[in-house]
Amino acid sequence: MTELRVAVTGLAEFNKGLRQLDKEAPKGLRLALNEAAELLVSETRSLVPRRTGAAAGSLRAASTRTSARVKVGGPKAPYYPWLDFGGRTGRRRSAARPFIKEGRYLFPTLSRIRPRVLATLDEAIRTVARDVGLDVD
């Protein structure tokens, strides 16, 4: 029996290969990426200060077949960037919060839980590959 080894160097290549094996497989990849982004959202949400809960509620996981994102703010909490990074805003820039380049919530949380996010992503991608019949090392 001949063993064929395939090495994937990028997510876009992996997605393209999945599409060739099974037209529905890239959807599983998008869901895998969403799972990793959702881990970051759930960890960050508990750290965001609450007055109405709109800022914490504005954290959303989003993904495509080749990228994972976390969306914040939006129409209900347009002040989220100010809350996380600081600066001056409001009438005559009257609301001041010390500026922190790295942010207070989202990026520090990502730095802290990066190994868990990567492990979740790794396992989810392996599961997608197994589901289309690939043996994964």
Image: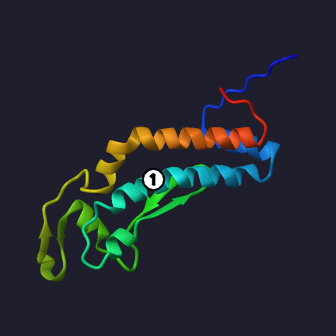
Q: Looking at the rendering, in which quadrant would you find the C terminus?
A: top right
Q: Looking at the rendering, in which quadrant would you find the N terminus?
A: top right
Name the residue located 69 percent from the left edge and 55 percent from the top edge.
Answer: 27
Q: Point out residue 112 in the picture as x, y percentages from the top left corner.
A: 32, 43
Question: Which residue occupies the extreme right position in the image?
Answer: 1
Residue 56 picture quarter: bottom left
Q: In this view, does 59 lie above or below 104?
A: below
Of residues 79 and 125, the one drawn nearer to the viewer in this rendering: 125
Tell me if mark 1 has few (under 14), some (14-19) or many (20+) residues whose alpha carbon lies within 10 angstroms of its own: some
The three-letter amino acid code for the residue at tag 1 is Leu
**Residue that carries the numbered disc 1 in the rendered image:** 39
Name the residue located 36 percent from the left edge and 47 percent from the top edge.
Answer: 110
Q: Point out residue 67 in the picture as x, y percentages from the top left corner.
A: 55, 51
Name the residue located 48 percent from the left edge and 53 percent from the top edge.
Answer: 37
4 lies left or right of 101: right
Name the residue located 33 percent from the left edge and 55 percent from the top edge.
Answer: 106
